[in-house]
Image (cartoon, rainbow, N blue to C red):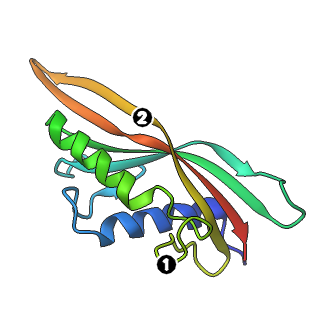
Amino acid sequence: MTEHPYIALCRAVKTRLTAASEIWGQQVGEVPLATWPKPYVQMYYIAGGESNNIIAQDADYDLGIKVVSEDMEESLIGAARLTALLNDQGVQDRPTTYLYGGSDWEICTATQGRAIHIVEPFAQSQFFYHDGHVFSFVLGRV
């Protein structure tokens, strides 16, 4: 059975972000756990699916990927690290450092888009800072 392209993409992104020794450690996922220490990375689906650009199976997805921290400078530094680890990391972008989509899917391009910056109040005079980007990924069936 063929792996769904969204599953392959999420696995590739999580593998890249947890393999690097970064401020968020192993805390990367779509639904952050309440027990996770900050900072952590949250990624979430914005839009996408079958793109029908070619006759073969293909897909494109936009994911919001952001660092959540109690310190704005830390979240902004984390967002810069997300850029370094994910932007232009598709097979057609940089073949030596590409995101590996598995045996069913190839991540053709990974493109950083608009910035994400959210200041979330969570207690009196305390905030969570969310910083990152919307990333667009194009996948092709292997």
Amino acid type, callout 1: Thr
Q: How many marks?
A: 2
Circle nearer the N terminus (2, 1): 1
Amino acid type, callout 2: Ala
Residue 124, how many percent across, how many down?
Answer: 10, 18
Q: Residue at x 14, y 36 (%)?
A: 71
| Residue 33 appears in the figure | no
State which quadrant residue 21 falls in: bottom left
Is residue 32 found left or right of 93 in the rendered image?
A: left
Numbered tag placed on residue 96 in the rendering: 1
Numbered tag placed on residue 45 in the rendering: none
The residue mark sitting in front, 2 or 1, is: 1
Residues at discs 2 and 1 in contact (Cβ within 8 Å): no
Instruction: Give the distance between the C-alpha atoms of the residues marked 2 and 1, in whole angstroms.
Output: 26 Å
Q: In the displayed structure, would residue 3 be above or below residue 80?
A: below
Q: In the displayed structure, would residue 113 be above or below residue 87?
A: above
Foreground of the two, 100 or 113: 113
Residue 99, how many percent across, how many down?
Answer: 50, 69
